[in-house]
Image (cartoon, rainbow, N blue to C red):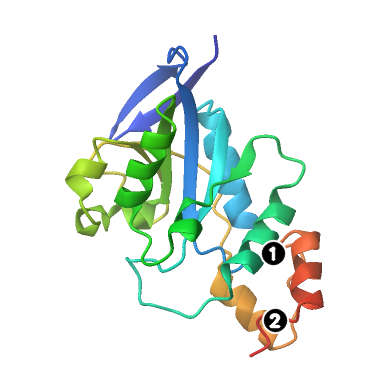
Amino acid sequence: MQKTTTSTNTQTVTQTETQGHKRRIGLYGGTFNPIHTSHLIVADQVGNALGLDEVLFLPDVIPPHVDQKSTIEPQLRIDMIQLAIEGNPLFGIELAEVKRGGISYTFDTIAELKQAHPENDYYFIIGGDMVEYLPKWHRIDELAKMITFVGVRRPGYQPKSKYPVIWVDAPLIDISSTDIRNRVQCGQSIRYLVPDKVATFIKEHRLYLE
């Protein structure tokens, strides 16, 4: 039986996989425009630290918590995710928000997934900076009872919240999708910022040039 040590709020706890038949599924939401190396590192570190059965990348359509921004069509982002996660059996993709369309409220997504998959327990992965925004999330009090939040520690942000959060350390790689798009537009290299197959896909489909 595998044990992993993490921290919840400010206390250290030891977690043991004793869920029985319940599958422990990580959900990592985002626009992934495009997916990059930092996304993959966080997902892999969290999945292994918590002994999750699977970590599913959850591409959104219209994120409710940031200023609306134009993104490329969902299928292109999905294709890049599929290329990026090849070779890691821990990873998968959940398309609930893309199929539903509209504003991607996490509450609606989790309610849908729990009804469809009562055999799963869900762990929702967010950056330490996003933990501060939890009080503003749609129906957050109900949502907090439905899932376990996993916060990835970030410098400058306190590992605390009024809501239960499991905190996990992961290597801090300062890469952003915005920077990648800007580099592509300026003709700069994005090698090692994204997997090679994603870089090739971006070039072949002439993405982010405008």
Check disc 2 and report its element: helix, strand or loop. Answer: helix
Mark 2 or mark 1, which is nearer to you?
2
Task: Say which residue label 2 marks.
Answer: 184
| Residue in the image at 33% along x and 57% along y | 105
Count neighbours of disc 2 (C-alpha within 10 A) and say few if under 14, some if 14 to 19, many if 20 or more: some
Residue 76 location in percent, x, y?
66, 68
Q: Element under label 1?
A: loop
Question: Residue, x 42% and y 19% (percent of image)?
Answer: 15
Q: For the C terminus, which image quadrant?
A: bottom right
Q: Position of residue 184 (x, y in %)?
A: 70, 81
Residue 125 in the image, given as x and y percentages of width and height: 44, 45
> Which one is nearer the viewer's eye here, 47 or 99?
99
Relative vertical location of residue 108 with respect to residue 19 in this rendering, above or below: below
The picture places residue 14, in percent across and down from the top left corner, at 40, 19
Residue ID for mark 1: 193
Q: Amino acid at mark 1?
A: Leu
